[in-house]
Amino acid sequence: MIKISDRLKSLVPYVESEDIVMDVGCDHALLDIYLVENNILNKMYVCDVNPNALQNGIDNIKKSGLEKKIIPILGYGIERSAEYNIDTLIISGMGSKNIISILESPNLNRVYKLILQSNNNHYELRKFLTQKSFNIAHEEIIKDGKKTYINIIAVHDMYPKTYTEKEYEFGPILIKDKKNINYFRDLLEEYEDLYFKSKNEQMHEKMEMLDEILDDLEAM
C-alpha cells in the first residue's frame, strides 16, 4: 500500500465512490494510487501536460499494478474531460493562477465538483469560482512544512452565491470555524508587519477584516 503526505491525504475525504474523477497535474499519481488501493474509487483518470511528469505517474501506476484502474492522459485534462464523462476534478499543490488557467475552459460547465488545493491568491480563486457558477461547499487550512495550503471544495450551482469582500479574501467557511482562530491570529501579525513597513492602505483594510473575524471567533 502506498504512503502519501498529510497534504495529499487531506483531500481524500472529499472524494466519494460515485465520483468520476480526473486528477489534473497528477505528477507522480500518488494520491490517485492511494484512492484506488483504499477502495475509495474503483477507477479514475490522471493527466498532465508535461510528458515527463505524466511518465512518473505511469511508472508508479505500473509498479502498483493498477494500469486497468488508473487511466493516464497526456494534455490539458479539462479539455479531455467530456470524453470520459468526468464530473469531479482534483487540482492540488499549485498556485491559484495555475489552477485558474487550467479551469478556464468551456468544458468547466460539464463538471460538478472541484477539489482544489492552493497555496496562494485564494481571493482570486474564490472570485473565479463564483463567476463560473460554483459555490464553495467546504474549506480547510492545511500546513505542509513552511507552506500553508487551503483546500477549497466547490460545486456547480445554477444559483451561485455572491460573497462579501471579507469572505472572498479569507474564506466563507474558514471565517466561521473557531478551530482556525490561530491561523487568523498569525495572519494578522504577518499583515501588521507588512503594513508597518509599507503603510499600504489595502493591507490596513485586510487587517480590519481580520480584527472582525477574530472578534467573531473569540465570541463563539
Image (cartoon, rainbow, N blue to C red):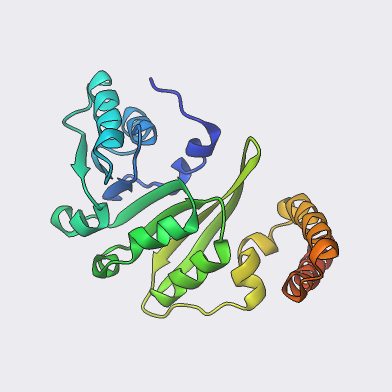
Q: Nearer the viewer, residue 201 or 47?
A: 201
Farthest residue, direction front? 198
Q: Which residue appears at 33% of the width and 63% of the height? A: 112
Q: Position of residue 181 (x, y in %)?
A: 77, 54
Quarter of the image that includes the C terminus = bottom right
Q: Which residue appears at 44% of the width and 77% of the height? A: 160
Q: Nearer the viewer, residue 49 or 4?
A: 49
Question: Looking at the picture, does residue 64 appear above or below residue 119?
Answer: above
Q: Is residue 91 left or right of residue 5?
A: left
Q: Quadrant of residue 102?
A: bottom left
Quarter of the image that includes the N terminus = top left
Q: Which residue appears at 35% of the width and 37% of the height? A: 27
Q: Position of residue 16 (x, y in %)?
A: 37, 47
Q: Is residue 87 left or right of residue 1?
A: left
Q: Position of residue 119 (x, y in %)?
A: 56, 50
Question: Looking at the picture, does residue 42 appear above or below residue 174?
Answer: above
Question: Looking at the picture, does residue 145 appear above or below residue 187?
Answer: above
Q: Nearer the viewer, residue 54 or 41?
A: 54
